[in-house]
Structures are given as C-alpha cells and as structure tokens.
Image (cartoon, rainbow, N blue to C red):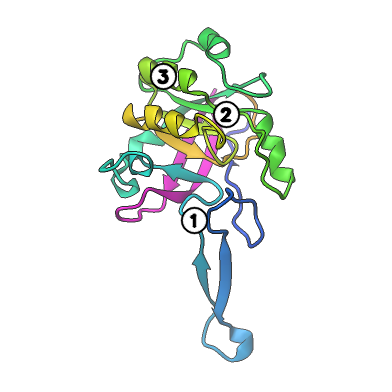
Amino acid sequence: MSNAWIDISVPLYEGMLYWPGDAPFERRKTLAIADGDACNLSEIRGSAHTGTHMDSPLHFIEGGTSIDAMPLDATIGRARVIEIQDPHLIRIEELKPYHPGPGERLIFKTANSRLWKIPEFQSDFVHIPPDTARYLAEAGIRTIGIDYLSVGHGEGGGAETHRILLKADIWIIEGLHLEQVTPGDYELVCLPLRIIGADGAPARAVLRRLP
C-alpha cells in the first residue's frame, strides 16, 4: 500500500468556480522580471471561502471563534473518508452503519467530486440537511469535510446546517476534491491561512492512507 500523500485541494486560478455572490479569485502580476523588474510579484484577491477552504464559527455565529484561533488538532490526525451513495443528501440513515463517534474527523466523498469538471456553479449538489447536522453534532464529531463549496444548500437550510455544526464546535472543510480517493482511514493534514479575525480562509488539504 502506498504511503504517498494525496492532495485533495482545489487549485486556485482566475476563472475558477466560486459561490454565487462571493468575490471571484483573481491574481494580478504587479512586478515581472520580463519587464525589467527585480522579481516576479503577484497580488491576489477573492473571497475567504475560495476553493478548498475552512469555515470558522464566526462565519455564522456572531462573536464566534475566528479562523486564526482554530486548534491545530482539529485538522491534523486520523480521518475517515466515507463514500456517500445518495445522489442528493447526506442522510442519517446512510451514516448510522458507520457509527460516527466523539472526536472523529469525517470526510464525505459524494457525487460532488465530479462537479469540479464543470466550470459553472452547480446548485444541485449533495449536502448536509439540518437533521443530519444535528445527528453529527450529537455524535460529538470534531471535523467535517465535503467535496463542494458548502456543507449546506444555498436554497434552503444551508445557514441552519452551518449554525448547528459550528455551534457544536465542529470545524468545517469545504471544497475538497476526492474523486481519486477511496473510502477508508487516512492521516489528514489541512491548514487554513492564519488570518486574524477571519470567518474562514483558503486551505491546503492532503491525505495519506493508513494501514
């Protein structure tokens, strides 16, 4: 079995997919060696929730913890990749056989991973409804990852899903690319940018299969 790290992050580039209403990612060259400058230098702009990113409680809870205060062990350590078969929702009934427990880091591989091949935002993506969010909160889950831009749906229940998870101190990783990842146990490393007072931040996420 290979112990190589698997990059499950989405690359950042101009024209990439982004959540409707958010600021799109932009990178502008401000200096260029080819133009006679001493170095190459870029300016980047965009939403804090661009590509692979993390939500902090502050994203939906006034006065909540900001991303710079995230405990490192929330996203470094053992994680389970669970493949979801339902094409629409992550349902309680599908999760129960996995017996999710306190302190676990769960990464949900869904049909969403195929959506990264489509440049336009797709509103019909697999997500966590509020009742499943409550189930995960009651189970004491530590961290949740999903393979599209949000754990909750934008057209109904998405804000409630976020609030339930974040109030339960569940850290959220969104925008993962899991198409090449098989279900099972992994070592996870996912670190968001340490932006003081931010509601979220882009992140780099990698997995390594455990024996």
Crowd rating for badge 2 (residues with CA inside 10 Å; few <14, some 14–19, many 20+): many
Image: magenta residue range: 185-211
Q: How far apart, in angstroms, are the residues tagged by discs 2 and 3?
A: 14 Å
The picture places residue 118, in percent across and down from the top left corner, at: 74, 45
Of labels 2 and 3, earlier in sequence is: 2
At a point 41% along the width and 53% down the height, the residue shown is 193
Which residue bears the numbered disc 1? 47
Image: 21 above or below 181: below
Q: Secondary structure at mark 1?
A: loop
**Residue wearing tag 3:** 134
Nearer the observer, 205 or 121: 121
* The stretch drawn in magenta includes residue 191: yes
- Look at the numbered discs 1 and 2 and tell me whether their residues touch, using CB distance below 8 Å: no
| Magenta-drawn stretch, dominant element (helix, strand or loop) | strand
Q: Which residue is mark 2?
A: 127
Residue 150 in view here: yes
Q: Quadrant of residue 127?
A: top right
